[in-house]
Image (tube, grey):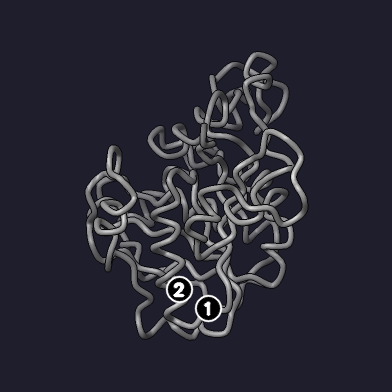
Amino acid sequence: MQGGGIGMAGESAAARIAATVRRLAAGALDLVLPPRCPACGTIVDADGVFCAGCWPTLDFITPPMCAACGDPFEVPQPAGALCGACLASPPPYVARAPFAYAGAARAAVLALKHGDRQHLAPMMAGHMRRAAGELAEGATLVPVPLHRWRLWRRGYNQAADLARALAQATDAPLAVDALVRRKATRPSQGMNPAERRDNLRGAFVVPPGRRAQVAGRRILLVDDVLTTGATAAACARALRRAGAVSVGVVSFARVVRA
């Protein structure tokens, strides 16, 4: 069921209307245009199917992987093994993703995020559901929020679109506005870990009126891509402070450490 609190207040009415118009337009186009590869746009047999050229560039993440962050291991490891980064600094979450952020997976993320191709969300959510596994069982879905100015400029939050599609696929409770980004942060590219933490300090909060959607619950945080994990960690800490029992993270792709 999608009871459990479906929050919409954080998205402006104009943004919601614009997103609805885009979805309707995409649906109308689907009736007259052939389905295309999510990555390159080549005509394919069915919606959400990668073409023969893009499919080999999908780097599936499968075991063995770090039990905490989900970064894949190159050689077999015992169950529950952690990577070096998580041993040194355990994250406040458990993360999973179906693909490495490269090739066709990267192209699909960019198409959703910057190409206004919101119709890709259900396909991406299907892969995320498989990767999330037990993290999704009994969990409330919460998307990583955008700051209101970025949401206003883009017109939609791709993480929220993925969370909605995942909720429809899993029948999980969805709390769109349980987490708010109250501070516009600087791009973290090139920052060291301490600088990333400082940049994100105080950026995320669970509003008092939304705490009932979080307290005592298992939360599955939803995003399009996991990069350094700094944003996921800041979100997880805010959710934990609001009483979340545990925080999992699922994204369509993740940056694999070299």
Is residue 179 something that shows in the picture? yes
Mark 1 or 2, nearer chain start: 2
Question: Where is residue 56, by image quadrant?
Answer: top right
Determine whether label 1 and label 2 are within 8 Å by CB.
yes
Q: For the point 25% across and 59% down, which residue is it?
A: 198
104 or 203, nearer to the observer: 203
Q: For the point 48% across and 46% down, which residue is it?
A: 226
Above or below: residue 256 compared with residue 240: above
Is residue 213 something that shows in the picture? no
User: Residue 123, percent across and down?
Assistant: 64, 41
User: Residue 175, percent across and down?
Assistant: 50, 70
Question: Where is residue 219, by image quadrant?
Answer: bottom right
- Could you tell whether 30 is left or right of 232 in the image? right
Residue type at mark 1 is: Ala
The answer for how far apart the CA atoms under marks 1 and 2 are is: 6 Å
Q: Estimate how packed mark 2 is, as few (under 14), some (14 to 19) or many (20 or more) residues with alpha carbons within 10 Å.
A: many
Above or below: residue 225 compared with residue 79: above
User: Residue 133, percent across and down?
Assistant: 73, 56
**In this figure, which residue is indicated by the disc labeled 2?**
239
53 or 225, nearer to the observer: 225
27 or 158, nearer to the observer: 158
116 or 228, nearer to the observer: 228
Q: For the point 49% across and 44% down, which residue is it?
A: 225
User: Residue 17, percent across and down?
Assistant: 37, 55
Where does the N terminus fall, quadrant-wise?
A: bottom right
**In this figure, which residue is indicated by the disc labeled 1?**
244
- Could you tell whether 107 is left or right of 43 in the image? left
